[in-house]
């Protein structure tokens, strides 16, 4: 469950969700990190986050005039990337604080839960979720919901932390997650407790092949994945039948 640490002006300085990922707790946690979210991501990724966003856009392959939904879009920095080249990209997130933090980004925004999207059946040409599926209480249900709102022939791209493919690197990466990442977060984040949850949720997340199986079970075809940064991140793709 979510926990509060010290109080500043009556507000908890540390708020984190549990691995049961109750939606209200996850939303509250992200509300607390919203103000410095983009900066923290860039620092923790060593500046690799921009490249991961570009790779996600390229994997989706949306054409000018098409409409895509960016689920768990946060401050909409990923949505702006998706909108390049005349694509209509819509940011969707259930954290009001994150959407407010990205208010200056000129893309459409809607509040919504990945498991119950506020869109009609077959209303978009593609769906992207970047570093958000891991935070959904029922990821399989979300994958089915993405299929519901996507037109036949449309594509899903899931950009998510994954399992490094080289064993020595995987060991080093795990040490970084559990030891270095929380220390860095304490220096730059407005809610460092959230990054303890981040490390734990990455360790508990399935590897590439298992997640590909989830996409197939949810009705996505032509499922494949591409490893980025040695498997620290993986792009999973699927096509709506």
Image: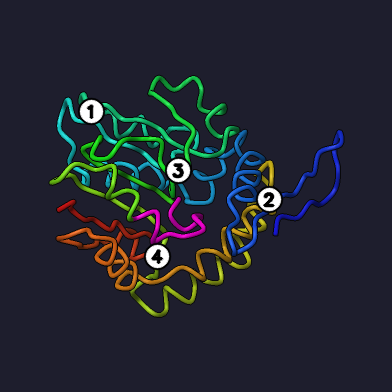
Disc 3 from disc 1: Cα separation: 18 Å
For marks 3 and 1, the one nearer the N-term is 3
Residue on which disc 2 sits:
192
Q: Residues within 10 Å of mark 2 (few under 14, many from 20)?
A: many
Residue on which disc 4 sits:
162
Residue on which disc 3 sits:
72
For marks 2 and 1, the one nearer the N-term is 1
Q: Is 193 within the magenta?
A: no
Foreground mark, 4 or 3, reads 3
State the quadrant of the N terminus: bottom right
Disc 1 from disc 4: Cα separation: 28 Å
Q: How is the image coloured?
A: rainbow
Which quadrant of the view contains residue 76? top left
Disc 3 from disc 2: Cα separation: 20 Å
Residue 136 image point, x, y percent = 49, 55
Disc 2 from disc 1: Cα separation: 35 Å
For marks 3 and 2, the one nearer the N-term is 3
Q: Which mark is residue 87?
A: 1
Q: Classify 178 as above or below 84.
A: below
Residue 215 image point, x, y percent = 28, 62
Foreground mark, 1 or 4, reads 1
Give the magenta range.
132-143
Q: Residue at x 63, y 39 (%)?
A: 31
Q: Residue at x 23, y 55 (%)?
A: 237
For marks 1 and 4, the one nearer the N-term is 1
Disc 4 from disc 2: Cα separation: 22 Å
Q: Is 133 within the magenta?
A: yes
For marks 4 and 2, the one nearer the N-term is 4
**Circles 4 and 3 in contact, beta carbons < 8 Å:** no
């Amino acid at each position: 469950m979510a926990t509060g640490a010290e109080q500043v002006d009556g507000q908890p300085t540390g708020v984190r969700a549990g691995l049961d990922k109750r939606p209200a707790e996850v939303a509250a946690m992200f509300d607390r990190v919203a103000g410095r979210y983009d900066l923290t991501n860039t620092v923790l990724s060593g500046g690799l986050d921009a490249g991961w966003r570009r790779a996600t856009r390229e994997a989706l392959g949306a054409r000018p005039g098409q409409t895509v939904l960016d689920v768990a879009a946060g401050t909409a920095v990923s949505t702006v990337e998706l909108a390049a080249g005349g694509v209509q990209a819509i940011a969707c997130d259930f954290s009001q604080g994150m959407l407010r933090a990205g208010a200056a980004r000129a893309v459409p925004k809607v509040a919504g839960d990945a498991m119950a999207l506020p869109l009609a059946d077959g209303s978009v040409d593609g769906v992207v979720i970047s570093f958000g599926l891991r935070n959904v209480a029922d990821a399989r249900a979300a994958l089915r919901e993405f299929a519901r709102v996507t037109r036949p022939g449309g594509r899903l791209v899931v950009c998510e932390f994954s399992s490094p493919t080289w064993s020595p690197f995987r060991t080093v990466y795990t040490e970084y997650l559990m030891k270095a990442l929380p220390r860095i977060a304490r220096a730059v984040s407005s809610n460092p407790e959230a990054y303890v949850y981040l490390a734990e949720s990455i360790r508990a997340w399935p590897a590439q092949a298992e997640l590909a199986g989830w996409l197939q079970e949810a009705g996505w075809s032509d499922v494949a994945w591409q490893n980025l940064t040695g498997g620290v991140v993986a792009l999973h793709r699927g096509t709506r039948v």
